[in-house]
Structure formats: structure tokens, C-alpha cells
């Protein structure tokens, strides 16, 4: 049975591992432990999913809790996908936000069709500027 938590501390190793097992690691700095640590330390909100002691999903967000929340990582281990874990992590995030706070995210290419099915609307005017 999957256990969800909003308070459990996770290690950089656990974070890296679930990113790899979800394929999100293809677009994350897995070789930079200091960056992964900062991603966890400076997140405003974490929601996690566990199968026993194994981290199988995470929603990592940056938010002001009132107006907007950016889910910067929504990762579910591929072996656990299609069980509602991602949807549950989104809901766990939403429950901790103010009543008018919108959730924003950029879909990974492999997950692009997923978000319409869990209540998100496509927005044509998102822009990203990478730091070279």
C-alpha cells in the first residue's frame, strides 16, 4: 500500500533515485549533488509517496501559498505509474495551498498528455529562459 507524506525528510540519494526511475532524471542535474540538495532544501512544499521505505513519487514545488504554486518536479517511478500516485501528489500539494492558489507546471515531453486528464489546462504563453 502506498503511503503519502508531506513531512517526511528525503535524502539527495532518494531524490536522485526516484528522478532516475521516473525518467525525469533525463532533464535534471543528477551529477550535481549540491544542486539536488539545494532543490530539496529550498523547495517550499514537498509531497511524497512511499512503498515501505522506497520513495516512489515526489511533487516538489515553489510557492507563495496564496496566488501561485509551481510544481517543478512531479516524478513517479515508472514501475508505479498508472496507479493514481501522480494525481494524489498533485492533490496533496493543492490541499496545502490557499483557496485561490493556482498550480502551474511545465510538462516533461513524455508526460505532455497526462495533465489534461488530471484537471490542468494547456497554456500557450509559457516561456522558459535557460541559463547558459
Image (tube, rainbow, N blue to C red):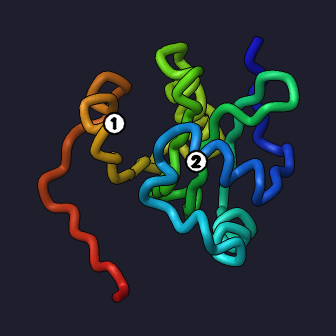
The dot on residue 53 is none
Horizontal relation, residue 32 to residue 123: left or right: right
- Residue drawn 74% across the image and 36% down it: 55
The dot on residue 111 is 1
Q: Of all residues shown, which one is farthest toward the bottom? A: 132
Q: Position of residue 89 (x, y in %)?
A: 59, 33
Q: Can residue 66 be seen from the camera position used here?
A: yes
Q: Can residue 69 be seen from the camera position used here?
A: no
Q: Closer to the N terminus: mark 2 or mark 1?
A: 2
Horizontal relation, residue 71 to residue 46: left or right: left
For the residue pair 109 and 2, the one nearer the viewer reads as 109
Count of numbered badges drawn on the protein: 2
Horizontal relation, residue 52 to residue 119: left or right: right
Q: Position of residue 80 (x, y in %)?
A: 58, 21
Q: Quadrant of residue 36?
A: bottom right
Distance of label 2 from label 1 (alpha carbons) = 14 Å
Q: Position of residue 120 (x, y in %)?
A: 31, 35
For the residue pair 2 and 122, the one nearer the viewer reads as 2
Residue under label 2: 19
Disc 2 element:
helix
- Residue drawn 77% across the image and 11% down it: 1
Q: Are marks 2 and 1 in contact (CB under 8 Å)?
A: no
In this picture, is 27 found above or below 79?
A: below
Q: Quadrant of residue 110?
A: top left
In this picture, is 48 found above or below 69?
A: above
Front of the two marks 2 and 1: 2
- Residue drawn 57% across the image and 55% down it: 61
Amino acid at each position: 500500500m502506498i503511503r503519502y507524506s508531506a513531512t517526511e525528510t528525503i535524502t539527495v540519494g532518494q531524490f536522485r533515485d526516484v528522478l532516475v526511475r521516473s525518467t525525469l532524471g533525463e532533464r535534471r542535474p543528477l551529477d550535481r549533488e549540491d544542486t539536488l540538495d539545494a532543490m530539496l532544501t529550498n523547495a517550499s512544499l514537498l509531497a511524497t509517496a512511499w512503498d515501505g521505505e522506497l520513495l516512489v513519487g515526489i511533487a516538489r514545488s515553489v510557492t507563495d501559498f496564496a496566488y501561485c504554486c509551481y510544481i517543478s518536479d512531479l516524478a513517479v517511478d515508472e514501475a508505479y505509474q498508472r496507479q493514481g500516485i501522480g494525481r494524489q501528489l498533485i492533490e496533496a500539494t493543492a490541499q496545502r495551498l490557499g483557496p485561490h492558489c493556482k498550480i502551474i507546471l511545465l510538462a516533461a515531453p513524455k508526460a505532455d498528455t497526462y495533465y489534461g486528464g488530471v484537471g490542468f489546462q494547456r497554456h500557450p504563453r509559457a516561456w522558459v529562459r535557460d541559463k547558459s
